[in-house]
Image (cartoon, grey):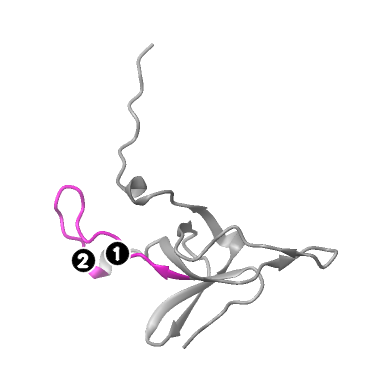
Amino acid sequence: MKFRPLHDRVVVRRIEAEEKTKGGIIIPDTAKEKPQEGEVIAVGPGGRDESGKLTPIDLKVGDRILFGKWSGTEIKLDGEELLIMKESDVMGVVQGQAATNRPAPARKKA
């Protein structure tokens, strides 16, 4: 089934979190929190301003995004669990694949 969100909404597929910690401890399903990272799979045309002019969305299909813990509405399409949320619920776009595994930069001592 094809689905196109309306206005400034996007459809997001959650990206599953790691099942192990960095130390190798396996996290059981009951202790896991729902991931707050996802991939945009559909984008609406955009919102309208006060004058009725269409304002396009900054997101595009394939973007890897971060969103709030309680953002969006969970739906099931073709047996797949997805989220529909407004563009304003998205906190930002993750740039590049290595962005999630990159260590913090070292600080130089003065």
**Residue 84 sits above or below residue 89 on the image:** below
Whether the magenta-drawn stretch holds residue 37 is answered as no
**Chief SS of the magenta region:** loop
Image quadrant in which the C terminus is located: top left
* x 67%, y 67%: residue: 46
Residue carrying label 1: 32
Residue stretch in magenta: 12-29
* x 31%, y 41%: residue: 102
Q: Which mark is residue 28?
A: 2
Q: Secondary structure at mark 1?
A: loop
Percent of width and height locating residue 73: 52, 75
Q: Which mark is residue 10?
A: none
Percent of width and height locating residue 52: 82, 68
**Residue 4 sits above or below residue 58 on the image:** below
At label 1, the amino acid type is: Lys
* x 14%, y 52%: residue: 24
Query: Crowding at label 2, few (<14), some or many (≥20) Cα neighbours within 10 Å?
Result: few
Q: Secondary structure at mark 2?
A: loop
